[in-house]
Image (cartoon, rainbow, N blue to C red):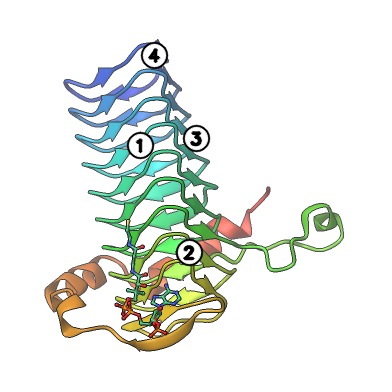
Amino acid sequence: MTVNDNISLGKRVKIGQNSIIQEGAVIGNDAIIFPNVFIGKNTKIGIESIIQYGAFIEHDCNIGKHCRIGTNTVLRRETNIGDHSIFGSLSASEGKNWIGNNVLIHSQCHLTTGIIIEDWVFIAPLFVGANDPKMLHGRRRVEKFIPKGPHIKFGSGIAVNVTLLPGVVVGRECIVGASSLVTRDVPDFSIVFGAPARVAKTVDESWKLPEEMYEEFRMRVSDEDLENFLTRVLSEYKH
Ligand SMILES: CC(C)(COP(=O)(O)OP(=O)(O)OC[C@H]1O[C@@H](n2cnc3c(N)ncnc32)[C@H](O)[C@@H]1OP(=O)(O)O)[C@@H](O)C(=O)NCCC(=O)NCCS
């Protein structure tokens, strides 16, 4: 275990063998860091969060309280995850993205730079979010690349094996069916599926979350906050 002197370690934190914690990191009370974990410079881990075996968390990430970061995950720089959220095993975040509270991301998901995932979203395994419409790669030498991540709004459910193309917005409390390829924005409260995904119907009343939960989210985070976040992190974007 290599723990830099210049970190803030809460009370009763447990750190497993061979883990590395770099300077400026802040680990909240009662957090559990399993063996073989890497936590980069200035990354914050909230109270009672659990970081499982082999998680690789780069610098300047923010992980809220009571989160679980799964086995062999990769969270690249400036990944932001709210409270009570789960990031499933073998999933990867490219960083400079925003994930809210009470979000459940299953195993083997790929969260691209610039993606926004609001509170109470569920994402099943094998999710892919894309952010580069032109796949510029080496052509970024001649054309400026600004990532355009998808945005999944409050309370939506994304079934297994879904792909969201760059910049698409999945509205509030939608259901995106298994193996969908989402190429266009999805209106609030819709059920969509297929490749390309099309609206099949609207969700049942029984699917809708209590309005107080939505209001609580809105008190905490506005559309403007999310827009400002994207402007800030993506203006200084370098691959
Ligand atoms: C989107 C979903 C909720 C639709 O369920 P539903 O409303 O009960 O739809 P139905 O089963 O009544 O199917 C209606 C029609 O749509 C088709 N259909 C349903 N889901 C489809 C999908 N994902 N892709 C393509 N066609 C689909 C059905 O084949 C059926 O067509 P048919 O009338 O020609 O036979 C469901 O397909 C789904 O994806 N559930 C989530 C599963 C999942 O991934 N859970 C996460 C586990 S970790």
Cα–Cα span, label 3 and label 2: 29 Å
Q: Eyeballing the image, is 202 above or below 145?
A: below
Which is nearer the N-term, disc 4 or disc 1?
4
Q: Which mark is residue 110?
A: none
Marks 3 and 4 close (CB-CB < 8 Å) = no
The answer to which image quadrant residue 208 occupies is bottom left
> Viewed as shown, does residue 194 lie left or right of 139?
left
Expressed as whole percent of the image width and height from the top left, the position of residue 4 reads: 42, 15
Q: Nearer the viewer, mark 4 or mark 2?
A: 2
Q: Which mark is residue 59?
A: 3
- Residue at x 15% of width, y 79% of height: 206
Q: Which mark is residue 162?
A: 2
Q: Say what secondary structure mark 1 lies in.
A: loop
Expressed as whole percent of the image width and height from the top left, the position of residue 27 reads: 30, 29
Write down the residue under mark 1: 70
- Residue at x 48% of width, y 29% of height: 41
Q: Eyeballing the image, is 206 above or below 150?
A: below
- Residue at x 23% of width, y 68% of height: 217
